[in-house]
Amino acid sequence: MGLDARRSEALLLWDGGGSPGGDGSAWPFSDPRLPSPPARLLQWFEARRGRLGWEDAIAAPLLEARAAALGDAAPGPPRVLVRVDEFPHARSFDDAGKFGHDAYMRFHGVLAEAGVPYLLAVSPRVSADYLDPAVERDRPLSAGEEARLAELRDDPLVTFALHGLNHRTRHASPRRRSEFTGLSPADAAARIDGAVETLRGLGIEVPAFVPPFNRFGADQYALLAERFEIVCSGPETIRLLGFQPTPMFWGEALYLPSYAPLYEKAAKALPEVERLRDERAALWAPLTLHWGWELEDDFAGLRRLCAVLADGLAVDWQDLREAIAEIRRVD
């Protein structure tokens, strides 16, 4: 097994006190690879039909591997990594109304009251129409949004990720929406580096990347992995990078896709979180929320989810970063 598999095994068996090392033999998947385009398309269809997913294809083999390697020490509370998309909301060009920054802070308040740490995906510009590739007009962050970001920056519960430059798609088709696919390496790098510098000027560091629409080109992964410790993705990424284990070391970054039922509205993700808790499935479990979705029930589902996560299940993203750094030092 290669270096990536050894590192992924170390993260799977991580106990918080240091890397257990190993030769990768406990890692139940092959070394990272990019499936062929037909294979990726088939995986995408299988995932959409519910025949390829987190529970059976990822969680089950990872739990078996932990049990084989650790025995009675394998069970424990799940390590739920809560990711939140997106700030500012892609529909908040007017900086007010239903998706404005005041509404976001109500969402944040629910997580903060429960003490739930999370990763927040941030874009430094807001598109006038993020779904229309012909509309190039956008704006910088407003004074109100900058003030809110400053509040969040000072909150120890919040870690930040870059969510593109302005979340505007380059493709009209819903199945192809992406801010990055089709860009040359130089153009993609310039877009990312400019966005990172803008946020850095506001005191916001972004160790992770969350792609708008969960799509970027397979040829862009290396570029992202050079710039970020963690590269996140979601169900839409399957067509571009294939159905991959999560989390796993892949090249220069930790690759962290999030899949259903942990990529859902809070109310629908809750049963899976409860299952992981009840089964003492001590896995890193990436859970993705879209705060705009939670407005539909005025955060009722989110409150129920947070009541469960508050019981020591949601882990700080800084803990994950420390584990990544320690594992890399050992290797």
Image (cartoon, rainbow, N blue to C red):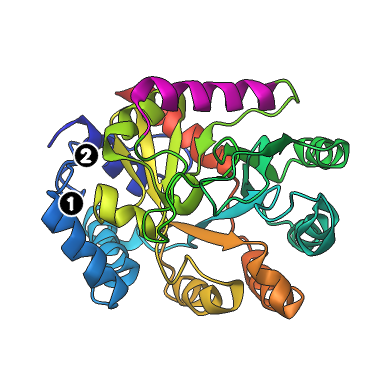
Residue behind mark 1: 29
Which x, y percent locates residue 135?
Answer: 59, 45
Tell me the amino acid under the disc marked 2: Ala
Which type of secondary structure does the marked residue at label 2 adopt?
helix
Q: Indicate the quadrant containing the C terminus: top left, top right, bottom left or bottom right.
A: top left
- Front residue of 164/149: it is 164
Residue drawn at (59%, 57%) of the image: 314
Say whether disc 2 or disc 1 marks the residue closer to the N-terminus: 2
- Front residue of 287/165: it is 165
Q: Which residues are magenta?
A: 183-200
Query: Would you say the residues marked 2 and 1 are in contact, meaning their CB atoms lie under 8 Å apart?
Result: yes
Q: Which mark is residue 172?
A: none
Tell me the amino acid under the disc marked 1: Phe
Say whether residue 88 is visible. Answer: yes
Q: Which mark is residue 5?
A: 2
Which type of secondary structure does the marked residue at label 1 adopt?
loop
Residue drawn at (87%, 41%) of the image: 144
Which x, y percent locates residue 29?
Answer: 18, 51
Say whether residue 15 is visible. Answer: no
Q: Main secondary structure of the magenta part?
A: helix
- Front residue of 18/223: it is 223
Which x, y percent locates residue 247?
Answer: 36, 48
